[in-house]
Image (tube, rainbow, N blue to C red):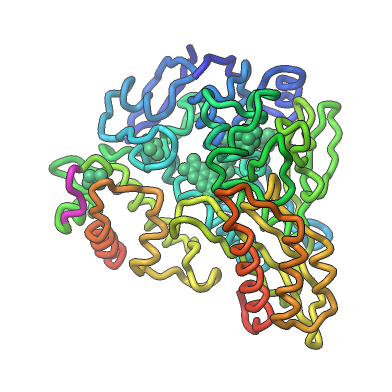
Amino acid sequence: MQTLNLQVNGETHELSVDVRTTLLDALRQHLHLNGTKKGCDHGQCGACTVLVNGKRINSCLTLAVMHDGDEITTIEGLGGSDTLSPMQKAFVKHDGFQCGYCTPGQICSATAMLDEIKEGWPSYVSVSLVGEPELTSDEIAERMSGNLCRCSAYPNIVDAIIEVGDKS
Amino acid sequence: MKSFDYQRAETVEQATTVAAGKNASFIAGGTNLLDLMKLEVLSPDVVVDINRLDLNAIEQTDDGGLRIGALVPNSKLAADARVRQHYAVLSRALLSGASGQLRNKATTGGNLLQRTRCYYFYDTASPCNKRSPGTGCSALQGQNRLHAIIGASEHCIATHPSDMAVAMQALRATVEIEQTDGHRRQVPLQDFYCLPGTTPQRENQLESGELITAVHLPAPVEDSYQAYRKVRDRASYAFALTSVAAVTQIRSGTFSHVGLSFGGIAPRPWRDTEVEAMLLGQTPSRQLFEKAADRLLEEAQGHGGNDFKIPLLKRTLVAVLSEAANFGGDA
Ligand SMILES: Cc1cc2nc3c(=O)[nH]c(=O)nc-3n(C[C@H](O)[C@H](O)[C@H](O)COP(=O)(O)OP(=O)(O)OC[C@H]3O[C@@H](n4cnc5c(N)ncnc54)[C@H](O)[C@@H]3O)c2cc1C
Ligand code: SF4
Ligand code: FES
Ligand code: FES
């Protein structure tokens, strides 16, 4: 067992975990934050996406003990039922889901992805590597390809993201 | 996952000392190691966390190149202004790999050392010489769509899956290694990986406990065409079936620099200096490109499921060189 501190959604938690515990399992099983989902557990689906120090990652492929002192934001930290974030609202408005299983990961990923665009990060489909990235549906599809949706709500997910991206 | 002793290294010396002589693995991003540990393909006794080491910088070197720390995340490297401007092939290759989330975690060192995606390597119920030496190679007579057409042996036909390493090799990068005696050595990337031969379990020049500290890129090639063309089963978030990294320069109508590297086709990022020499000093033409591709593929051998890679790689190389010949503006 190993003890560590996680700053999750603004609150500090001291945890004692088996060293094998992934960040995903620490969030779900130790902190009972069940918004973050486990799909594949192997980095292939994106359902477990959370923000670590502002950057999106797959929480299933990292150990909790590697994140001692880190700031974690989960879907619960982006907003609750009465305090939906702009991205959460846009997903509701555009019907960006069916079963909803991939949705927390999609929303965390999309939120951080827009910050990457703001920082000027290019993508594989960007025509120029040095210009300002554009917010086209091709760009969003490429940048969000790490989030699979078994219900294939992709067109509505893209619409939701474009709306939030255009506003900010 | 089997349990292990978790050690967090605070210094490079500590990391190499703790790992030397043991069944130990360094953990950087963890995106490949943990994937394999969950399946018990790998079960290290000791996991040495290197994330607190000071290896996170991209620095200009005295010879006008770049030194990329082993812990620099793939996303940060792809977005670095100097890399985008002068080493576009590397940005493109990184951006073609994995997903946004994975690139935020995946590191320079970990990406170089990621293991093959051969299905049988992942399946502990199947014979596999790389995972369990001496048990045989299931891919030879089995599913081998992802597998090598060049450089393989009858003991293993797995490919190295990295896109980043292919681009770095086209840029003629070197790997900086911390030895367990505290000294550092540099190995050209093209000599870093081993071919499988009779020992497919040995994949590179690292000895027990040795740590990659950085990758060095030489000064950029001026006015160069740079491209990373990746062919895969879906448009994004898939490994390469074949890929071509190119860094070329044309002066007075002939090739004055040719750096080519190939992915998805061999046990390591593939380079063929004879092919480069055939092109150097020559006037670009489709006929020349086809001759070069034929030379590259002279000894290529399919295994059934991957036969398609032979014509595919030829077409990919000819397409990239044709673009290089017409190159005018920036990448
Ligand atoms: C779903 C999925 C899709 C992917 N798609 C692609 C793709 O299209 N293209 C591609 O190129 N890659 C792809 N990858 C692989 C990804 O790029 C690698 O997992 C990643 O680069 C590994 O880096 P890491 O820092 O997480 O390594 P880790 O998992 O931490 O380590 C990998 C290995 O390197 C060793 N190691 C790490 N750092 C050092 C060091 N400094 N010195 C010595 N040893 C070290 C570790 O001990 C371990 O053996 C994909 C991965 C997943 C899960
Ligand atoms: S190709 Fe290599 S990794 Fe795959 S089964 Fe054969 S020996 Fe194992
Ligand atoms: S559960 Fe982490 S990527 Fe699928
Ligand atoms: S809404 Fe069902 S998986 Fe995406």
Residue B104: tell me if it is visible.
Answer: no
Q: In the displayed image of the protein, which residue is found farthest to the top? A: A1
Q: Which residues are magenta?
A: A95-99
Q: Height in image: B126 above or below B82?
A: above
Which residue: 45% across, 26% down? A64
Q: Height in image: B172 above or below B45?
A: below
Q: Nearer the viewer, residue B173 or B49?
A: B173
Is residue A96 within the magenta segment?
yes
Is residue B216 within the magenta segment?
no
Placement of the C terminus of chain B among the 4 image quadrants: bottom right
Describe residue A168's horizontal placement relative to residue B325 as left or right: left
Residue B144: tell me if it is visible.
Answer: yes
Q: Main secondary structure of the magenta part?
A: loop
Describe residue A144's horizontal placement relative to residue B2 as left or right: left
Query: Whereabouts is ligand 2, in terms of quadrant?
Result: top right
Q: Nearer the viewer, residue B62 or A27?
A: A27
Numbered circles on residues, count: 0
Q: Height in image: A103 above or below B9?
A: below
Which residue: 41% across, 57% down? A143
On the image, the x and y values in percent for residue A92 come to 16, 52
Which residue: 72% across, 33% down? B200
On the image, the x and y values in percent for residue A138 come to 38, 66
On the image, the x and y values in percent for residue B173 come to 76, 54
Q: In the displayed image of the protein, which residue is found farthest to the bottom? A: B252
